[in-house]
Image (cartoon, rainbow, N blue to C red):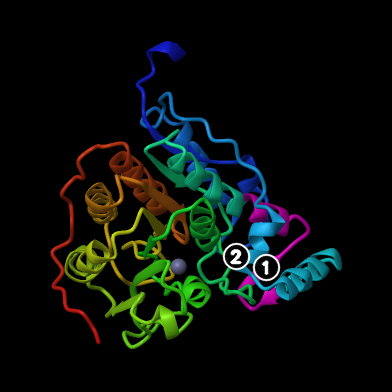
Amino acid sequence: MTEHQLPLKNTALVWSDRFLGHDTGHHVERPARAAVIREIIASDRCLAERPEVYVQSVSTDLLQRVHDPRFLDALDRFSRSGGGWVDPDTWLGADSLDVAAVAAGAAVAAVEAVLDERASRAFALGRPPGHHATRDQAMGFCLYNNIALAAQAALDEGMERVAIIDWDVHHGNGTQDIFYDRRDVLFCSVHEAGLYPGTGHTHELGNDRGEGFTLNVPLRAGQGDAAMLRVIDEIFTPAIRSYEPELMLISAGFDAHLDDPLGDMRVTDGGFALLADRVCALAEEVAEGRVVAVLEGGYDLDALARSVSAVIDVLDGQAPERRSTAAHSSVQS
Ligand code: ZN
């Protein structure tokens, strides 16, 4: 097939070979995750003429608008002194901050491509993940908070309301921390109760002017697709409809998968496709279709590859396959 015969797809897949760096050794969050994603985006099923998105490192100015400059200085000093473990989960090696800056830059570039209407939707496929990084702390495999930086970039471009749906199996405590007292970002997280980092209870609703603009739904382990979809349909969708965001972001973690070693939520490949389909439909209704997904966790390589493929298919406009588990659902309070 020559290039001219490739189908046209308007979803940008935002990638850099730099994501193969940040060597964490035997850690679950490792370069092999990026390697399987590179295979997917080079595979026949994803091959298409797509919007090209140039990725560069996130700017220092934007980093300082989201993270505490003293934290950024301390992280830089730690890196220059040779790095090591930031905490028992989080490795920082010689190139880690550079790779993290490109992962954050990819999330920002994905948002810019959608705001500029160069792409209708976009998926930033970087690592390390970001949603545990708070305003002043790197933690939980995360150095910079990619999705918070993407949301801030959209606000800096003149958007007034951005909604984030975080379906990673872990609570997005860093994103919550950064926007907790603000109402220009509606943060909605569904996660498995009792897992790292131990936050994300239903009573965490935001603070001050941000009160009511954080929504947390912890689910009991093992409930699968049906429970996750029910949270989106019954809790997040009405909140997002009344919020009327101009852009919808997804913290797209895949560690809620049935095969993932870190969680026990038992979501299927098809379940992730259905979740993405719900977000896309909602974005059509309230946000002129603008959806940007940003990769978070997902540590079983095969499950990660299949689930990312399933979500790309949905972002490309394909109907999700109905393969959801029949688990009973109930929302844990
Ligand atoms: Zn996770």
Q: Position of residue 134 (x, y in %)?
A: 57, 74
Determine which residue is flagged by label 2.
27
SS category of the residue bearing label 2: loop
Would residue 226 be found to the left or right of residue 304 on screen? left
Where is 109 relative to 244, above or below? above
Element on which disc 1 rests? strand
Q: Are the two marked residues, 2 and 1, in contact with CB atoms closer than 8 angstroms?
A: yes
Q: Is residue 277 above or below residue 93?
A: above
Kind of residue indicated by mark 2: His
Q: Residues within 10 Å of mark 1 (few under 14, many from 20)?
A: many
Q: Which mark, by number, is residue 122?
A: none
* Residue type, label 1: Trp
Answer few, some or many: residues within 10 Å of disc 2's Cα (few below 14, many 20 plus, some between 14 and 19): few
Looking at the rendered image, the quarter that the C terminus falls into is bottom left
Can residue 304 be seen here? The reply is yes
Q: Quadrant of ligand 1?
A: bottom left
Q: Residue 226 in the image: x percent, y percent?
A: 17, 65
Question: Along the line of sight, which residue is nearer the eye, 36 or 149?
Answer: 149
Image quarter for residue 54? top right
| Range of magenta residues | 86-102
Question: What percent of the width, then of the height, locates residue 246?
Answer: 35, 53
Residue 96 in magenta? yes
* Residue corresponding to mark 1: 91
State left or right for residue 291 relative to residue 279: right
> At 40% from the left edge and 25% from the top edge, which residue is drawn?
48
Task: Identify the residue at horizontal 42%, vertical 43% (top origin).
Answer: 122
Q: Residue at x 54, y 61 (%)?
A: 129
Residue 149 in the image: state x and y as whole percent: 55, 59
Work out how far the residue at label 2 is from the one at label 1, CA to CA, in angstroms. Answer: 9 Å
